[in-house]
Image (cartoon, rainbow, N blue to C red):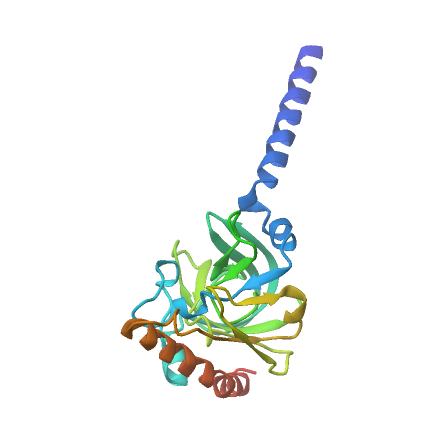
Amino acid sequence: MKKLIILIVTIAVCIGICINLRGNRRETTFKKVYDSFDQIDYSFAISAFGKTRDSRVMDYIDISTFDELKNKSKIIADVEFISRRQLYGVIETRVKVKKLYKGHCDKTITIYEAGFVGENYNAVVIIQSKPLMNNKNRYLVFLQESIPENGRYYTFVNTILGSYPRSNDMKKIVVNEKDGEAIVKKKDLDDVELVQVHYSKETIEGEEKQDSEGIYNKTLSLYETFKKKALSEYQ
């Protein structure tokens, strides 16, 4: 009996150690890593548009009309932030679905947000023109299903036009990209919902890059109108 108790205790201790080690891996402790940086790099925001779309954001769609946004969306819903982690270079944001306007999904789903943190960077890299979702807002989101296709994993249809905070008045900031970086202090993102990057001539050199910049700027110009339509139609 004594040996059995010792065995059970030993197993419990081993399990506890394994859980602790797993919980402290970089992949599962996004908040700890995110909090260690005091700045955000938006230099890759253009990468989600046009012919030069980055392989990490291939799932996103260039949108030109509000009807197109609605039609391309598998899910349209109000959601609230629960938690976030980075797993294998992908930011996974868990949200609670508060109200569903289109489609069918679980009450809790994961949205892949375009960005990552890494050891070789001096900032959190965000491949979109928005701050990451937070617990201060409820969001109206336009989503497409992602892998695995089981009703629980989604991406925004578009990195700019795929989400709208319910509680914020629009506050936009402009950042100038220089030497491949478009850095914003994390503290300067309070109450910001749109980050517009002005790219240097060197960065957008070439016809395809100029095409991507044109689509990017056009999409940014649609944001305010789309937000008004979205919040009016989905109340």
Towards the viewer: 210 or 27? 210
Residue 159, how many percent across, how many down?
A: 45, 70
In the rendered view, would you say 65 is above or below 183?
A: below
| Quadrant housing the N terminus | top right
Residue 188 falls in image quadrant? bottom right
What's the residue at 63%, 30% (across, down)? 17
Towards the viewer: 200 or 175? 200
Left or right for 45, reference 7: left
In the rendered view, would you say 85 is above or below 95?
A: above
In the rendered view, would you say 82 is above or below 17?
A: below
Towards the viewer: 10 or 133? 133
Count of all numbered marks drawn on residues in the image: 0
| Quadrant housing the C terminus | bottom right
Residue 222 falls in image quadrant? bottom left
Residue 72, how many percent across, how many down?
A: 36, 74
What's the residue at 57%, 40% (across, down)? 25
In the rendered view, would you say 211 is above or below 187?
A: below
What's the residue at 52%, 50% (across, down)? 118
Q: Is residue 36 visible?
A: yes
Towards the viewer: 226 or 54? 54
Residue 74, how many percent across, how many down?
A: 40, 70
Q: Is residue 1 visible?
A: no
